[in-house]
Image (cartoon, rainbow, N blue to C red):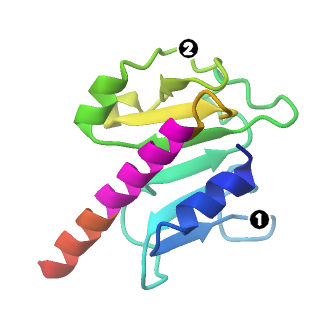
Amino acid sequence: MTIEEVTDYVTGLGGVLVLRPTEGSEAPEISWGDTFFYYAPDGVVPAGQPFATIVTKDYPGDETSDLNRPGSFRVNIAVSKTTFAAAAAPTDASIEDTVVAHPLYAAANWLAVVNPSTATEATVRELLREAHDLARTRSERRAAE
């Protein structure tokens, strides 16, 4: 999968706001070039975290995926506690095309895949759909309050 394929799939789920910070934007420089997915059918960034991200470089304190290699990226996905537990994900974040526990946010039920390809494509799509559904449910619950 490419970054564009992941992005196209997620935006096709509906109601998705995609943020791609660039040089000169108000976003922190470290985030430039990365992609953040929010459920926001109104186009307004909601409070809280995105439901998925694509990062293209190592962040300070998060170097275990070795994303500074040319062409590398990591898809990060917030899933349910049940899905996270069922994934029984390894914790070696440098393994490519394998679902792993996120190196920093595993405690918050985030999974990650470095350079997803044929071994993980179907799973990544399922996980992204679940993350989107969870974000949509949260949004609808907040709107009803």
Q: Is 123 a magenta residue?
A: yes
Picture layout, residue 102 above or below residue 50:
above
Amino acid type assigned to the residue bearing label 2 in the image: Asp
Left or right, 70 with reference to 113: right
Gap between marks 1 and 2 measured at Cα? 30 Å
Q: Secondary structure at mark 2?
A: loop
Find residue 22 and name its label. Answer: 1
Is tag 1's residue or tag 2's residue first in the polypeptide sequence? 1
The quarter of the displayed image where residue 134 is located: bottom left
Picture layout, residue 67 above or below residue 46:
above
Q: Which residue has dot 2 on it?
A: 92
Find residue 43 and name its label. Answer: none
Left or right, 63 with reference to 52: right
In this view, the residue in front, 110 or 61, is 110
Residue 69 image point, x, y percent: 84, 28
- Is disc 2 surrounded by few (<14), some (14 to 19) or many (20+) residues within 10 Å? some
Residue 51 image point, x, y percent: 43, 54
- Is disc 1 surrounded by few (<14), some (14 to 19) or many (20+) residues within 10 Å? some
Residue 25 image point, x, y percent: 73, 71
- Residue that appears at 67% across and 23% down: 96
If the image is split into quadrants, where does the C terminus sit? bottom left
Q: Inspect this view and state whether residue 67 appears.
A: yes
Write the start and end of the magenta stretch as one range: 122-135
If the image is split into quadrants, where does the N terminus sit? top right
The quarter of the displayed image where residue 80 is located: top left
Left or right, 21 with reference to 102: right
In this view, the residue in front, 123 or 133, is 123
